[in-house]
Amino acid sequence: MSLLHHTSDDAGLATAAPAVSLRGLTKSFGRDTVVDHLDLDIGKGEFFSLLGPSGCGKTTTLRMIAGFSDPSEGSIMVGGKNVTATPPHRRDVNTVFQSYALFEHLDVRGNVGFGLRRKGIDRRAIGQRVGEALELVQLADRAGSRPAELSGGQRQRVALARALVNRPQVLLLDEPLAALDLKLRRAMQVELKAIQREVDITFLFVTHDQDEALSMSDRIAIMNNGVIEQCGRPEDVYESPTSVFAAGFIGTSNLMPGTYADGSVAVCDGLRIPVPAGHGLGGGEQVSVAVRPEKIWLSELTPDMVRVPGTVVSSSYHGATTQYLVAIAPEVTLTVLEQNLPRMSPEDRWTPGSRVELGWLPEHAVLLR
């Protein structure tokens, strides 16, 4: 049987039920609650990311699903089966850690097949499954190499193959790319997503890297202080954040706090920002207006845009883009990201001190309570 086809003792149930279902999941250490009554469903075959800063509870959640940490309250279902009290080795999940945890005295083939040998699987079957796993991660030609002879990216692939060879229903990945350099990390993001699509196994990926989560995930849950601030498709959580934390954490967002009244937000004395209607706000409510840097224009403004005068404070060249900091009031500075056109010269860019007019479409402003 191919590695690419997962089997389960209850395949029909696993297909009908979410791959992972958490209800009221809570973890406390003394008086500190690290995960606070988490409810979450992760679909079969989904690439799902838990995204958040250090200490938000994402790794603790992963460890509870893996069985390495017992919840204080709540339940964990995997493929429709309650595994809250099930030992780690009897759960239909495998984990890939940031450290890889390879056995240095074993070659690649030995590392990948280690778990199968402990299960007492036939030697011939082990050889076939290990071969399939190494082909999948493009390491068939390094089967006889020791971990010390491999690059960081190759070691990461060995750890991935070792987890996949057991054909888990869910693969848990705890920041597995964090130790790689930027170029290799981006290459591995593409490869990891391609592998997930090929094997059709549910991936639960923990990361603090917003770009990583956006580029790889089918859905993202943004965690903060043990709770989920927002959960949805990458484009939804980026374009339509539902909280100030979500808007500020995923990507870069200009947040302009102020007071709502009569269709606009007063962000400081003498500066009111018009906002779209239909939000149900009452006068005097404290809100924030969020606008992404790439949604703001500094040239070719159209009549339907919200327009605000400002002064360029600084500019920084980033190759394909130039980032500007523009002061629109003494206490309010916005980040603007402009595409550099192919024939644009340094003289075409705005310089510090330049008076400019910012503009954005009303629908690109998100109003947050």
Image (tube, grey):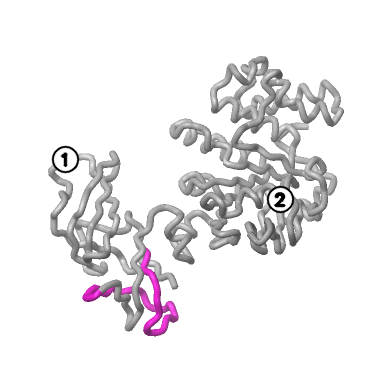
List x then y, in percent, for residue 219. Answer: 57, 54
- Name the residue located 48 percent from the left edge and 66 percent from the top edge: 242
> Horizontal placement of 116 versus 315: left or right?
right
Q: Which residues are magenta?
A: 269-290
> Horizontal placement of 358 versus 263: left or right?
left
User: On residue 67, which mark appears?
Assistant: none
Asked whether residue 13 is in view, the answer is: no
User: On residue 345, which mark appears?
Assistant: 1
Residue at the farthest front position: 30
Label 1 neighbourhood size at 10 Å, few (<14), some (14-19), many (20+)?
few
- In terms of image quadrants, where is residue 95? top right
Q: Amino acid at mark 1?
A: Ser
Instruction: Provide the residue designation for mark 2.
Output: 64
Label 2 – label 1 distance at C-alpha: 54 Å
Label 1 residue SS: loop
Foreground of the two, 164 or 4: 164
Label 2 residue SS: helix
Q: Quadrant of the C terminus?
A: bottom left
List x then y, in percent, for residue 86. Answer: 82, 49
Label 2 neighbourhood size at 10 Å, few (<14), some (14-19), many (20+)?
many
Is residue 285 in the magenta section?
yes
